[in-house]
Image (cartoon, helix red, strand yellow):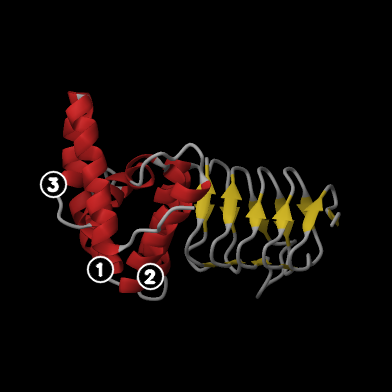
Amino acid sequence: MGKELFAEDLWNQITKEVSSLINDDKSLESIFKRNILDFTNIKDSIVFIISNKLSSDDLSSDDINSSIKEAFSDKEIILALERDINAIFFKDPACNYFFQPLLFFKGFHSIQSYRVANYWCDKKLALSLYIQSKVSEIFNVDIHPNCQIGSGIMIDHASGVVIGETAEVGDNCSIFHGVTLGGIGSEKGKRHPKVGEGTLLSANSIILGNITIGDNVKIGAGSVVLENIPDNSTAVGIPAKVIN
C-alpha cells in the first residue's frame, strides 16, 4: 500500500493528475476545469460537484449550494471525504487516480451527499430528506440521513445499496452493490444492524435487524444475515453461518 494523501497533498495530486490527462487528451478539458481546476481546494470542488448532482427544477444548484458548503466547512466531514478517497484508491483495482472518485464514482458521491444530509438532519430535516430522495433517484442508493457512517468508506458500484435509519457502519468498511442494512417488521427504535470497523459486505448481502457484525468481518455475496457475527469471521449463506 502506498502513502495516503490528505489536505494540500491530496489536492495537489488530484490537480496534477487531471492536468496531465488534459495534456494527453483535450476532449475532457472543460469537464476537468469546471469541476476541479477552477477551484483551489477540495472543499470548493466537492461543493460544486454535489450541488450540481442534487439540483433539480425545484431546487437550483445555487439554492442548495450554501447548505452543502456549510456542511463541508466542517473539518471532520472534509477529513472523512479525504479518507474515503484514499480508501477507494487503495482498495479498488479499477481506481487508477485519486481524482476518479471525486469526479466519476457514484458510490463516493452518494456517501458525500449522505454526509451533507446527516449534518442537517437535526436543523433542516426536510432538506435532509430531499437529499436522501434525490440520491436514491439519481444514484440508486438509499441512505437514511440519520444513520451513522464512519470514514474510509468504499461503496463500490453502489447500485441498490440501502442503509436504514438506525444502522451504524464503522470506519474502513467496504460495501458492494445491492447491500441492504435493513430492519425487521414495523418495530420502532434501534432496528438496524451495527457493522464494525474494517468489514466487507459483499454484493447483494442482506443484514437485517438489531444485530452486530463485528470488526474485520467478511460477509459473502448473496448472504442473508439474521444473527450477530463475531470479529474476524467470514459468514456466508442463507441464513448466513460463520465458516471460519
Q: In which quarter of the image is residue 207?
A: bottom right
Q: Which of 36 and 239 is in front in this view?
A: 36
Image quadrant occupied by the C terminus: bottom right
In percent of the image, x 83 and y 53: which residue is there?
Answer: 240
- Along the line of sight, which residue is nearer the eye, 203 or 141? 203
Which residue corresponds to mark 3? 38
Which of disc 3 and disc 1 is earlier in sequence? 3
Which residue: 34% across, 47% down?
Answer: 102
Q: Which residue is drawn at 25% across and 54% down?
A: 11
Query: Which residue carries the number 2 mark?
Result: 119
Secondary-structure class at tag 1? helix
- Reading the image, the residue beneath label 1 is 70
Does the rendering let one see residue 160?
yes
Distance from the alpha carbon under mark 1 to that under mark 3: 20 Å
> Are the two marked residues, 1 and 2, in contact with CB atoms closer than 8 angstroms?
yes
Which of label 2 and label 3 is nearer to you? 3
**In 3D space, how far apart are the residues under numbered discs 1 and 2 (Cα atoms)?**
9 Å
Q: Residue at x 59, y 61 (%)?
A: 164
Residue 200: percent from the left, percent from the top?
Answer: 64, 54
Q: Earlier in the sequence, mark 2 or mark 3?
A: 3
- Mark 3 element type: loop
The crowd level at tag 2 (other Cα within 10 Å; few <14, some 14-19, many 20+) is: many
